[in-house]
Image: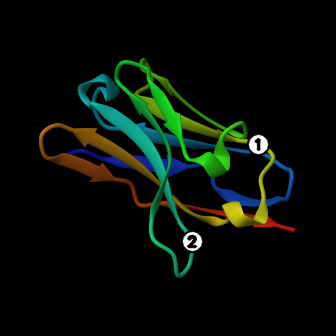
Amino acid sequence: QVQLVESGGGLVQAGGSLRLSCAVSGSILSFNSMGWYRQAPGKQRELVAKITNGGTTNYADSVKGRFTISRDNAKNTVYLQMNSLKPEDTAVYYCNAVKWPMGNYWGQGTQVTVSS
């Protein structure tokens, strides 16, 4: 049973920073990619950032230059450093792990609220 446990969400003022963590049961290198998604009220879930087991990263245009995804293989943890936060970043953030061909796993989500 794969478990992803997010932490680090909270309330922050615009311009502030937060770091989200996703602790994974088992080795994160066993997954083809790890990612962070977010879902704001009334909107679809969207990709924020992703990192492959080869270390390739990609980001949504809206967060490029502000967010950084990284991982600590020894701790089996993936991080999302979020800087220069904006009110439009307010959402529930979900950790995701993909293992080909059919494994697709989600955490329970952590709320991020950015006040103006």
Q: On the image, numbered disc 2 is attached to which residue?
A: 40
Q: Check disc 1 and give the amino acid type.
A: Asn
Between residue 79 and residue 85, name the one nearer to us: 85
The percent position of residue 24, horizontal first and vertical second, equals 36, 38
SS under mark 2: loop
Q: How is the image coloured?
A: rainbow
Q: Residue at coordinates 44% horizontally, 24% vertically from top-left?
A: 56
Q: CA distance from mark 2 to mark 1?
A: 18 Å
- The correct choice, above or below, for 14 with respect to 1 in the image is below
Q: Residue furthest left?
A: 101
Point 27% across, 30% down: residue: 32
Position of 7 with respect to 96 (left or right) is right
Query: Which quarter of the rendering shows the C terminus?
Result: bottom right
Q: Is residue 49 above or below residue 90?
A: above
Q: Is residue 2 left or right of residue 108?
A: left
Please determine whether, in this image, residue 85 is positioned above or below residue 67.
Answer: below
Q: Amino acid at mark 2?
A: Ala
61 or 45: nearer the viewer? 61
N-terminal of the two: label 2 or label 1? Answer: 2
Image label count: 2
What residue is drawn where x is 41% and y is 60%? 108
Q: Which mark is residue 83?
A: 1
Rendered image quadrant of residue 114: bottom right
Residue 13 is left or right of residue 60, and the answer is: right
- Measured as percent of width and height from the top left, residue 76 is found at 40, 28
